[in-house]
Amino acid sequence: MKLWNKGFEPDKAIEEFTVGNDRELDLRLARYDVIGSMAHIRMLESIGLLGSDELPVLLEALQRILESAERGEFVIEEGVEDVHSQVELMLTRELGDLGKKIHSGRSRNDQVLVDLKLFMRDELKMLAERIKVVFDRLQSLSNEHKDTLMPGYTHLQVAMPSSFGLWFGAYAESLVDDMEMVVAAYNIANQNPLGSAAGYGSSFPLNRTMTTELLGFGALHYNVVAAQMSRGKTERAAAYAIASVASTLGKFAMDVCLFMCQNYGFISFPDNLTTGSSIMPHKKNPDVFEIMRGKCNRLQSVPNEISLLTTNLPLGYHRDLQLLKDIIFPATTTLCQCLDMCDFMLQNIIIKQDIIEDERYNYLFTVEDVNRLTLSGVPFREAYREVGMAVQRGEYTPTREVNHTHEGSIGNLCNDKIAEKMNKVLEKFGL
């Protein structure tokens, strides 16, 4: 069944090429398609395009379809083009001509747009919830290990004292920035395109404000052409949010891989959370974080892939846009899996104590000693030269004293302030 059927069927090869795996991807949209249709027919009844006796019959039938979708029992039958066609087919089978009335005043263009925006809203909100879990875990670890010092590096060279509290806390606050990107994408998705039809509106007296309220959208896409132009823009905004989170998570995974190796030896995990080698019996590999790093690196290519797919398209609908689902759907799933696994691993992380007692980290304290001399009245440049010459002569002996008190430093992590920042962002989701 095809909603555009005019009495002929396309060549089989053409159909297979143009439909691709869209039917499988559409299964994730089934509940949203039904919810959109329920709002649409309520509006149709309000403007006289459905009888008051017809509306409850259609709503009851759609409710049954919705329940089957939520149970995971909804299927798109062989020969049915997409989720929209399947829903209409099921209604027509059950209700006859009444089922054919639900498409009045809309096109598949705005129908799929509604489905996608409802879907992306939920996916982004779910992503925000997963980010918050990892954020809370990082903050908890930061507070727990705030006094456990570790080496800090620049250029992969020993630089200055850091702490596990500072390390965990840094990634927590980075996730706050990422969450702002998620909120921005959510706001773009949270606009109602229903009623834009094929992109140029309808001669029916549609009440688009009503469907906006029924579907819980935060705003209406007023201009019908702009509504259609949001196809691709919504996915691109979501992709940038996904890539931002993936960048933070991927960088953290890289740190973990470094810090687990014997040359660092800062952290470890229980044996059953590592993997081994087929030839080297001593190996305990950080495969989880290597896979996480790889997945997050791939996710950072998603905005570019979407941009290249949509960059030279003029206004109006084009079939190229169908391919967006194949890009963005797996991306949200992959990132949620990575966040879940990160939280699981962090529950089991083992922190090594007294790392900086090793003499290889003596030079961590040169800046501390320069600052100590400066605070005692020695001009900074003279203090710098004095400590530097001691290092050159091999005569430097560190004091191993660390006294950082300003906001965001080792001794004043400001985790409570960072939590406040995150909570302000989450309020925009209603979380």
Image: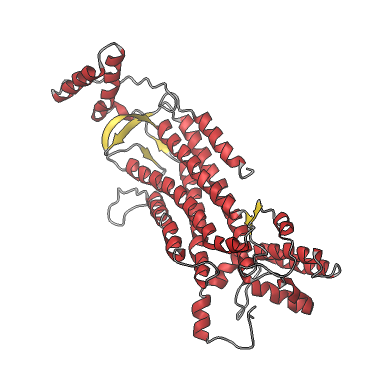
Q: Is residue 77 above or below residue 167?
A: below
Task: Specify whether 60 is left or right of 181.
Answer: right
Count every numbered label the image shows and give the total. 0
The residue shown at (52%, 44%) is 180
Residue 384: give x, y in percent of width and height. 22, 21
One can see residue 71 in this view: no
The residue shown at (54%, 48%) is 184
One can see residue 213 in this view: yes
Query: Looking at this view, is 422 or 279 the one in front?
Result: 422
Q: Is the N terminus in the top left, top right, bottom left or bottom right quadrant?
A: bottom right
**Residue situated furthest right in the rendering:** 53
Query: Looking at this view, is 261 or 64 the one in front?
Result: 64
**Residue situated furthest left in the rendering:** 393
Residue 245: give x, y in percent of width and height. 46, 48
The residue shown at (35%, 31%) is 150
Residue 253: give x, y in percent of width and height. 39, 46
Query: Looking at this view, is 427 or 76 the one in front?
Result: 427
Task: Specify whether 134 is left or right of 158.
Answer: right
Q: Is the C terminus in the top left, top right, bottom left or bottom right quadrant?
A: top right
Q: Is residue 340 above or below residue 165?
A: below
Query: Looking at this view, is 47 or 45 the one in front?
Result: 47
Residue 133: give x, y in percent of width and height. 54, 43
